[in-house]
Amino acid sequence: MANPLRLLSPSDAPPAAIASMPFEADLDAVAPRRLPVAATRPDIDLDSLRCFDAVATTLRFRSAAARVHLSPGAFSDRIGRLESVLGTRILQRTTRRVALTEAGERLLPVARRILRLVEYMPGAAKEGAGAPNYELVVGTRHEVAAVTTGRLGSPRFTAAPLHPQDYAFVGTDRRLRGPEDAQRLTLVDVSPDLPLFRNLLDGVPDAEPWRFARVEYMGGIASVRLRLLGSDGRVAVLPASFVKEDIAERRLTRLLPRLNLHTDNLRLAWRTNHPRQAELLALAQDLRAFPLR
């Protein structure tokens, strides 16, 4: 089966195509047969579905709880509530492992489809949303390439630049004026080596380390953004194109706007000396023709 390499613009895929599709047909797209309708409408909340999606992805309760910002106890209660409403076990849990039951395997694609549809609802409700963004799926027999802004410090990998990537220092707290104010704030980044915040430090000559009250690691830029939007007192460095709409609609504030952050590149990366390097270089050239949105 082909492994898909997904190249996504930072904003959502076009909502119009999905919003115009009947919901029943949407379910048919992810289920091999017509789904039975319950005699009574189940009271399933979206937060419980998000918890199920998280644990199905990580197969670890503690990691999944951290993804959705719940304590392990509260997370376990959410899963138990979902199983109670469904009337069946969707997870097999032991002290060493977590696995999906057959019911969980059947539920997962439907749950993820529902969560995706909810994400598209704001876009579907807007008038004049402008030109839709695109989703490009490249199928390969092996995972040969990835699109990344990560810095490749190993000779085992080769990369071709796609687009310049500017960064913005953002948060919901407008009172930050410099490093001295960081002591009352929480920095959110993707990993302990702070690859996002490093773009701020690298853009300032002789920059000293900032002393934050706390540092949180979210694993990905989408999770970092959600963490900022969901609470006050947190700041992060994120790709400017990724938070452009949040800044325009004042959901996030661009902090220290006169500060020149490091500019990086969005890259297509692959294993050095890959036998299809010529095709990968051609792919990179084609992708440079599509602007970031």
Image (cartoon, rainbow, N blue to C red):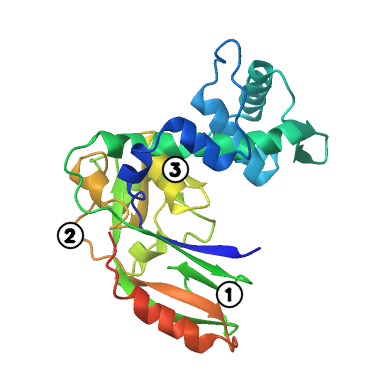
Taking the spot 68% from the left edge, 22% from the top edge, the residue there is 83
Q: Which numbered tag is attached to residue 213?
A: 3
Circle 1: element type: loop
Q: Quadrant of residue 184?
A: top left
Give the x, y percent position of residue 56.
65, 41
Mark 1: amino acid = Val
Residue closest to the eye, 230 or 140? 140
Residue closest to the eye, 140 or 48? 140
Give the x, y percent position of residue 141.
63, 72
Q: Quadrant of the C terminus?
A: bottom left
Per the image, the residue denoted by label 2 is 258
Give the x, y percent position of residue 148.
46, 67
Q: Quadrant of residue 157?
A: bottom right
Residue 178 position (above or below residue 123) = below
Alpha-carbon span between mark 1 and mark 3: 40 Å
Q: Quadrant of the N terminus?
A: bottom right
Residue 181 position (above or below residue 210) = above
Residue 274 horizontal side relative to residue 237, left or right: right
Mark 3: amino acid = Ala
Per the image, the residue denoted by label 1 is 144
Taking the spot 52% from the left edge, 87% from the top edge, the residue there is 277
Within 10 Å of disc 2 (Cα), the crowding (few <14, some 14-19, many 20+) is few
Cβ–Cβ under 8 Å for marks 2 and 3: no
Circle 3: element type: loop
Residue 32 shows in this picture:
yes
Within 10 Å of disc 1 (Cα), the crowding (few <14, some 14-19, many 20+) is some
Give the x, y percent position of residue 115.
48, 36
Residue closest to the eye, 122 or 186? 122
Alpha-carbon span between mark 2 and mark 1: 40 Å
Mark 2: amino acid = Arg
Residue 139 horizontal side relative to residue 248, left or right: right
